[in-house]
Image: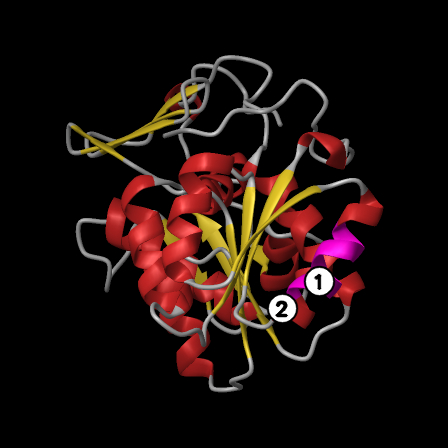
Amino acid sequence: MERTLPDNLDREHFDPRSMTVLVVDDEPRLRDIVRLNLEVEGYRVSEAANGVEAITRLKEDLPDLIVLDVMMPEMDGFEALRRLREVSNVPVIMLTVRQEEADRIRGLEIGADDYLTKPFSPQELQARIKALLRRTFMPKPARKTRIVVDNDLTIDFSKREVWVRGQKVALRPTEYRLLYHLVNNAGRLLTHDMLLSKVWGHEYRGESQSLRLYITYLRQKLERDPAHPKYILTERGVGYRFCELEPQQSETAVEE
């Protein structure tokens, strides 16, 4: 289900009082710390002690964002995330005490939107929550834009629809935002930090692993041969660029 932009939320400024955050962790002390800091900012906070409770809270509280711990009894964060993704595209930040890159990649592959390693500061969590809400609720472009890249790929930014070889392809919010900026700058090289700033937020500059992973996701959904892409091209060690578009391919100039 596509998440829509509340009246009082835009890309840079929003009223936290309209936002509900579900905090899922088996440590009551950590939940208390996170809840108190978020409530000071104005967020409404819901809590769950494990993945089973999280599924119930999702249905009852309809959170706008979930902070989800990995290591929990009864149902760990990975399994909880799998079940959440069966019914919802609510943005999720995963928490873990583990440092292994494989755990981070596993969470992102299942459907997490961000990953934070314990211990963390409440300020860092707040910054990531704000950045994730901004990009999740990105408004639609101001003007209608439909781009026929070629016979295989059509993108309609006014409807937030992507068609690949005649089939509508579902993109997660971060995938859509990444594609939006790549196409908006077709033919132009965008560095890793430029894309991270535009798509994730300035606080994510330098975190290239997430960018590489989402580039892979997009290629798997858009490219006929993801190993030899023709749309999203790599400039090794520098960044990415979308293929050149002919003037007639875009019905209207892309705006954000």
> Which residue shows up at 52% across the image and 24% down it?
4
Left or right: residue 151 versus residue 237 is left
Local secondary structure at mark 1: helix
Residue under circle 1? 32
Q: Residue 127 is drawn in which quadrant?
A: bottom right
Amino acid at dot 1: Asp
Quadrant position of residue 215? bottom left
Give the main secondary structure of the magenta stretch: helix
Q: Position of residue 212 (x, y in %)?
A: 45, 65
Image coordinates of residue 39 in percent, x first then y, are 78, 47
Front position in the image: 241 or 121 = 121
Q: Of 245 and 140, which appears nearest the observer? A: 140
Which color scheme is applied? secondary structure
Residue 172, visible in the rendered structure = yes
Q: How far from the left and from the top, in percent, is residue 188?
A: 55, 47
Q: Which residue is drawn at 61% across and 57% down?
A: 196
Is residue 21 a member of the stretch shown in magenta? no
Q: What stretch is highlighted in magenta?
A: 31-38
User: Does residue 194 appear to the left or right of 227 in the view shown?
Assistant: right
Q: In this view, does 132 lie above or below 82?
A: above
Label 2's element? helix
Which residue does the numbered mark 2 point to in the structure image? 28
Q: Residue at x 23, y 64 (%)?
A: 227
Q: Do the residues labelled 2 and 1 touch (CB within 8 Å)?
A: yes
Q: Which of these two is toward me, 150 or 104? A: 104
